[in-house]
Amino acid sequence: MKLLSIAVPCYNSAAYMEKCVESLLPGGDEVEIIIVDDGSQKDDTPRIADELAAKHPGIVKAVHQENGGHGEAVNTGLKNATGLYFKVVDSDDKLEPNAYKKVLETLRRFVDDPLDMLISNYVYDKEGAAHKHVVHYHGAIPKDKVFSWEEAGHFKKGSYILMHSVIYRTQMLKVCGLKLPSHTFYVDNIYVFEPMPHVKRMYYLDVDFYLYYIGRDDQSVNEKVMIGRIDQQIRVNNMLFDYYSKNTPEISKQKHLYNYMYNYLEIITTITSILLIIKGTPDALKLKKEFWDSFKERDEKLYKRLRHGLLGVAMNLPGKVGRGISKGGYKIAQKIFKFN
């Protein structure tokens, strides 16, 4: 069995996927790299994937599938994973070599009694930025020890656990039945939300491991792109809401988990709301009202908690002036937390 499986979803990624894979190869024979070609047709992604697999037999494998979107590519990576642990690295991102060594050393320590989740830092590798913003978890969770949700503290806004910062136990993901929706953007939010109640043993390694590239105009996290795909954002937001609502009785047994997942749901709901406010058309504002009303219809108690919380109030200030205040707050948050 491999120590770590790394899935690399690729869709027309010929311009940068080789650099990504090169950053994963220092893992050697302990690591398997699963390149998932998600129906690429516009460039040489399929050929490059096959060439990398042929060049690194036993380490790199290429899997080709009809286009199903990022979520389906992650599903395929997980389905083909044989490693004890599983990570997703997007094809335009990279891993930092020294941190990579430390991560593998840590995972080796927990082969006989595996972790459910290893957490590390990630870096906003923003094009042209002199200072690279690092997202860490200092003060929120213990360092360099196995811990549970009961030992977790308060996560700061902008420092939630994202796909970039997690390595999961492969079998845990399979047993919990994680299956991301196809042809849907922003499913990484589901990836770091639905498995959390199944996570019992965690470990935080305080190293800057994942280099998250920001800078392409067509990236899914580009604000204009997100506004253009607001229907996708709403779909994922609704899935998070329904999962939390359905599983509240079980999740609420663990106070820190319950609060963490609520706060994550709250911030995603805020992002959806502000994007609709920024779009600002009558249809967008109508959609925002319908979005919130649908919460009330499905779970009035959870709706009230979201709606009457600080962020819920901020996202629902009345009139043009209120929307202007909401947008101003969002722009300040962008500068503080360096996202998008």
Image (cartoon, rainbow, N blue to C red):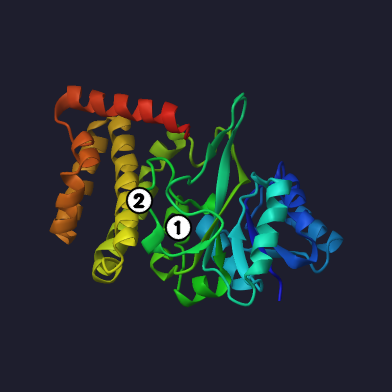
**Which mark identifies residue 192?**
1
> Is residue 278 shown above or below 56?
above
- The answer to whether residue 30 shows anywhere in this view is yes
Which residue is nearer to you in this view: 310 or 318?
Answer: 310
Label 1 crowd (10 A; few <14 / some 14-19 / many >=20): some
- Secondary structure category for the residue under label 1: loop
Q: Quadrant of residue 64?
A: bottom right
In the image, is 56 to the left or to the right of 156?
Answer: right
Q: Position of residue 203 (x, y in %)?
A: 53, 60
Q: Tell whether label 2 touches label 1 (CB within 8 Å).
A: yes
Q: Position of residue 294 (x, y in %)?
A: 19, 53
Q: CA distance from mark 1 to mark 2?
A: 10 Å
Identify residue for label 2. Answer: 264
Q: Quadrant of residue 123?
A: top right
- Secondary structure category for the residue under label 2: helix
**Which mark identifies residue 60?**
none
In the image, is 180 to the left or to the right of 211?
Answer: left
Q: Position of residue 318 (x, y in %)?
A: 14, 30
Looking at the image, tell me whether mark 1 or mark 2 is earlier in sequence order: 1
Residue occupying image coordinates x 30% and y 35%? 274
Q: Amino acid at mark 2?
A: Tyr
- The answer to whether residue 47 shows anywhere in this view is no
Residue occupying image coordinates x 40% and y 56%? 152
Q: Amino acid at mark 1?
A: Val
Which residue is nearer to you in this view: 30 or 292?
Answer: 30
User: Which quadrant: the N terminus?
Assistant: bottom right
Residue occupying image coordinates x 35% and y 50%? 264
